Image (tube, rainbow, N blue to C red):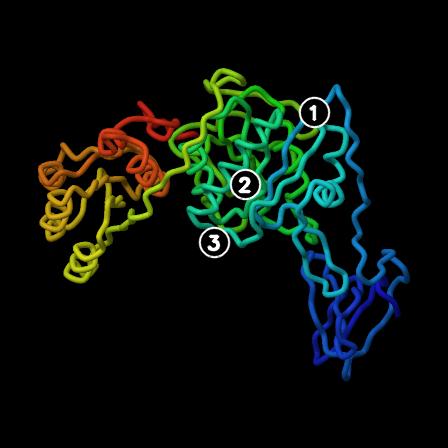
Amino acid sequence: MNPGDRVRVDRGGVTNEGVLLPSSTPEHLVVKLDGGYNVGIARADADVEILEADVHDIQPGESDSDASEIAFDDDLPTVSLISTGGTIASTVDYRTGAVTAQFDAEDVLRAVPDLAGRANYRGRVVTNILSENMTPDVWQELARTIAAEIRAGADGVVVMHGTDTMQFSASALSFMLDTPVPVVFTGSQRSADRPSSDNVMNAVSAVEAAKADAAEVMVCMHASTADDACALHRGTRVRKNHTSRRDAFETVGAEPLGRVDYDAGSVAFDRAYAERGATDLNVRTDLDGDVDLLKFTPGMAVDRYAAMLRGADLDGLVIEGTGLGHVHTDLLPVVEDLTDDDVVVAMTSQCLEGRVCDRVYDTGRDLLDAGVVEAGDTLPGTAKVKLMWALANRADPADAMRRSLAGELQERSVPWA
């Protein structure tokens, strides 16, 4: 038997069928199952039957993706592909059966050959990390890199990013960057070695969005579980609402900005947006890292959190309160102590829809008297990033939290059904 054969392996009363992959050790077989996952099986006492030979032409150390060269065409726009890590441009490493991330423009085109002929590409690597390891320092470097690419003539920018914290990075860039061209974040919920991978459609749709007219920071991901369209979400209004579905990302409190029809390659917008070229490039990367996000829950140890907050040397605090923006009354003295020390305390709601209004109930009015700033319908994670930026860039950061700077605070919250 050889790598590429379809096999049935029986061992220990368990049967697995799939394509045999090269293994890094002689003691184990690696089989790619029909669902896309790989399984390692000890060769000892394994009964292997070849169902079909040479189903795939696989050689150790080679990829199954066709190589694509970048063809420059004066009639095509230039799109900068910027990588921070993640799985969207990953390919299978047949030495191990795992997936490995690809980075420069040539690698991305090999991983997603459908991108060829849609634009001229340049590739930049900012970092190679899992998105849960994202930091404000990387946001700042990413903003500077995007600005450099725009100055160098990029007509649009696509940022390849892990999905877990993509909404935070998109928010950060929305505040740090005034852009005359589209900046489109995209990622992949499912890796390239799975039949249900969304990497190709998301990457292609993101490039089409980067060529379109909306000069905003957006997130481009599957609009539904089908492979027909991607939704374009404003960077400050998007939230990952499912751990694994391909349509995990949603615009909260409104409908998405637009939609990319995958088969037609067309982009349509349903809401007002900043037009291409309407603003000059401006980048302001200063951030205040002394900002925390606190989620209030019933039964939380108020004394412990009070001691932590009073000793944290904070410049800003975002509270994710209940309902219209409430916390236990025992926290009121803590909030008042913080605001007396010139800490900006902003209130958001842990509800997915709606906005904060602390003028309805006694607790809310007491919070306002204690100096809390209402953040309207700003999403809690976005509010934290915004406060980090506002403290470093605005003379009155508390007032900034009451105003919309990048579409994060809407005049009216309208759930999209």
Asked if disc 1 and disc 3 are in contact, CB closer than 8 Å, the reply is no
Q: Which residue is mark 1?
A: 264
Mark 1, Cα crowd under 10 Å, few <14 / some 14-19 / many 20+, is few
Label 3 belongs to which residue?
Answer: 132
Tag 2's secondary structure? loop
Amino acid type at circle 1 is Ala
Going by the numbered disc 2, the residue's amino acid type is Asp
Distance in Å between CA atoms under marks 3 and 2: 20 Å
Quarter in which the N terminus is drawn: bottom right
Give the mark toward the camera: 1 or 3: 3
* Residue 329, above or below 386: below
Q: Secondary structure at mark 1?
A: loop
Task: Say which residue appears at 47% left-offset and 55% top-offset.
Answer: 133
> Quarter-wise, where is residue 390 in the image?
top left
Compared across the picture, whether 72 is left or right of 326 comes to right
Q: Mark 1 or mark 2, which has the lower sequence index?
A: 2
Crowding at label 2, few (<14), some or many (≥20) Cα neighbours within 10 Å? many
Q: Amino acid at mark 3?
A: Glu
Above-or-below relation of 351 to 19: above
Q: Residues within 10 Å of mark 3 (few under 14, many from 20)?
A: few
Q: Using the image, determine if residue 171 lies above or below residue 195.
A: above
Rendered-image quadrant of the C terminus = top left
**Residue hosting label 2:** 247
Dot 3 and dot 2 residues touching (CB under 8 Å)? no
Q: Earlier in the sequence, mark 1 or mark 3?
A: 3
